[in-house]
Amino acid sequence: MQNVVHLSFAVTTVAAAWRLATPIVFAAIGETISERAGVINIGVEGIMLLGAFTGFATVFATQDLWFGFAAAIGAGLLAGLLFAFFSITIKANQIVVGAALNLLGLGLTSFLFRTYFVSTGQGVQIAPALDIPILSDIPYIGPAFFRQNALVYSTVLVVVAARFLLRRTAFGLTLRAVGEHPKAVDVAGLSVSLYRYCAVLIGSALAAVGGAYLTLAHANQFVEAMTSGRGFIALAVVVFARWSPVGAFFVSLLFGLFYALQLVLQAEPNLGVPYQALQALPYVVTIIALVVVRNRTDAPSMLGVPYRKA
């Protein structure tokens, strides 16, 4: 009987890790595509916040869940366009522009939320769990893994699509060349700026979906700064996964597991550990991961370097 309880606990924890990792998966896959093209966007956190708020506000006004996700993607594309203009066209420092985007996302969403929603106290509908026939009836595993919402399942599709894009399409191969040897792409008559714009916009759209997940599939409310550093964790995931979409998926699941564990451990009355220490667990793991991979040289050779024609 005790073994059954332990099995049920383990499966439930892993399923919760998948749910909690979902926004990080979207943001990390998007950032992987952007960095493969040589653009590092540390404004992921701000874009996620913009997606979370825009999705929430849209569903609050229209009661249409999927229109809320579409609006969040639109907000992400606008934020990505702003970032791309300054970092690619004007060739400003990408780190500085990304930091400014984080501040913009935090300040703008907090201002709009306090202005229009802080006194309402109302939530919105969220994406329902979907039962996969037959599989959802498997004891223990079925309810945990096959009764998730559509956004959780779609992480697998996003990973497969990103890997196919980067490795099996002419567009993806050129995108990777832009991050490694942009001069060669330019000599071939292709626009380096256009490919980098496309990569940034794809990455920003996915980050916005990750943010919208928090308000439209995980919680039913927007809270100021509710991303809680997930955008920065996504940046660490990309490095730890060595700029691989598949690796980013599994590393995100690892971070999701630590999120799930800290929630489970907080419910243990006799643990004797301050809850603040448990809440810091995912971020401590992030620091450790960055220390472990500090000497890796797998990054695109022109990452963070603006391209200037000779």
Image: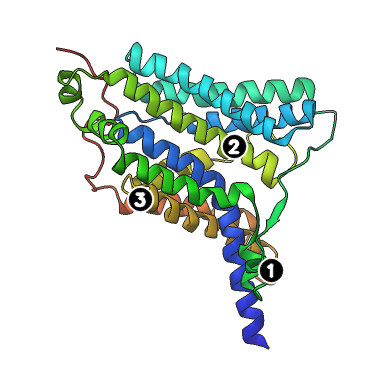
Quadrant, the N terminus: bottom right
The answer to which of 61 and 47 lies nearer the viewer is 61
Measured as percent of width and height from the top left, residue 180 is found at 21, 33
Instruction: Please say whether residue 104 is visible from this viewpoint.
Output: yes
Q: What residue does disc 2 label?
A: 211
Mark 2 is on which residue type? Answer: Gly
Q: Is residue 85 above or below residue 293?
A: above
- Disc on the earlier residue, 2 or 1: 2
Q: How many marks?
A: 3
Measured as percent of width and height from the top left, residue 104 is found at 55, 21
10 Å crowding of disc 2: few (<14), some (14-19), many (20+): many
At 49% from the left edge and 52% from the top edge, which residue is drawn? 156
Q: What residue does disc 1 label?
A: 268
Q: Are marks 3 and 1 in contact (CB under 8 Å)?
A: no
Q: Is residue 251 left or right of residue 153?
A: left
Structural distance between the alpha carbons of marks 2 and 1? 29 Å
Q: Secondary structure at mark 3?
A: loop
Measured as percent of width and height from the top left, residue 117 is found at 79, 26
Q: What residue does disc 3 label?
A: 241
Q: Which residue is farthest front?
A: 133
- Disc on the earlier residue, 3 or 1: 3
Mark 3 is on which residue type? Answer: Ala
Q: Secondary structure at mark 1?
A: loop
At 55% from the left edge and 44% from the top edge, which residue is drawn? 23
Instruction: Please say whether residue 279 is visible from this viewpoint.
Output: no
Where residue 271 sits, quadrant-wise, is: bottom right
Q: Is residue 301 left or right of residue 110?
A: left
